[in-house]
Image: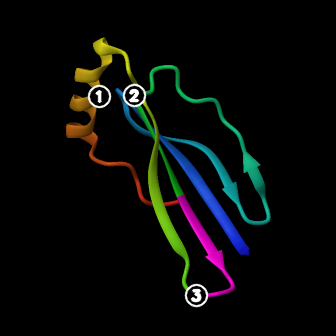
Amino acid sequence: MAIRKEWTEWHLTPRGWEKGSTRREGQGNDWRDEPSDRLLSYQHCELQTSSGPAKVTTEETWRTKEPAKIEQLESALAQYGSAPSRLD
């Protein structure tokens, strides 16, 4: 059983990584629309249970399938790097 589950969505755009929706313990969810020009999205999650250390994951949740944007995605990844592995 989780005693703490917090997460942040990160969206890669032509301008770089932008913070999206979040969940914080004691504050609930802060929902935000995805940027209209996003190329890639990840969710960074920290899950603390009563049995052991926190489980930290950063997983891809969405990727553009538009052929015209694939090159733009590759260029943005080369320029801005991989998704942030942090809550904020």
Q: Is residue 29 above or below residue 24?
A: above
Q: Is residue 86 above or below residue 31?
A: below
Q: Is residue 79 magenta?
A: no
Quadrant in the rendering for residue 14: top left
Q: Could you tell me the amino acid type at mark 3?
A: Gly
The figure's colour scheme reads rainbow
Is most of the magenta stretch helix, strand or loop? strand
Read off the residue under disc 3.
52
Asked if labels 1 and 2 touch by Cβ distance under 8 angstroms, the answer is yes
Question: Under tag 2, what secondary structure?
Answer: loop
Q: Nearer the viewer, mark 1 or mark 3?
A: 3
Q: Nearer the viewer, mark 3 or mark 2?
A: 3
Q: Which residues are magenta?
A: 45-51
Residue situated in front as seen by the camera: 63 or 16: 63
CA separation in Å, label 3 and label 2:
36 Å
Read off the residue under disc 1.
73
As drawn, is 64 to the left or to the right of 36? Answer: left
Q: Could you tell me the amino acid type at mark 2?
A: Leu
Q: Position of residue 73 (x, y in %)?
A: 29, 28
Earlier residue among tags 2 and 1? 2
Asked if labels 3 and 1 touch by Cβ distance under 8 angstroms, the answer is no
Q: Could you tell me the amino acid type at mark 1?
A: Leu
Quadrant in the rendering for residue 39: top left
As drawn, is 5 to the left or to the right of 41? Answer: right
Q: Residue at x 28, y 42 (%)?
A: 80
Q: Is residue 40 above or below residue 51?
A: above
Read off the residue under disc 2.
39
Badge 2 local density, few (<14 within 10 Å), some, or many (20+)? Answer: many
Q: Residue at x 57, y 52 (%)?
A: 8
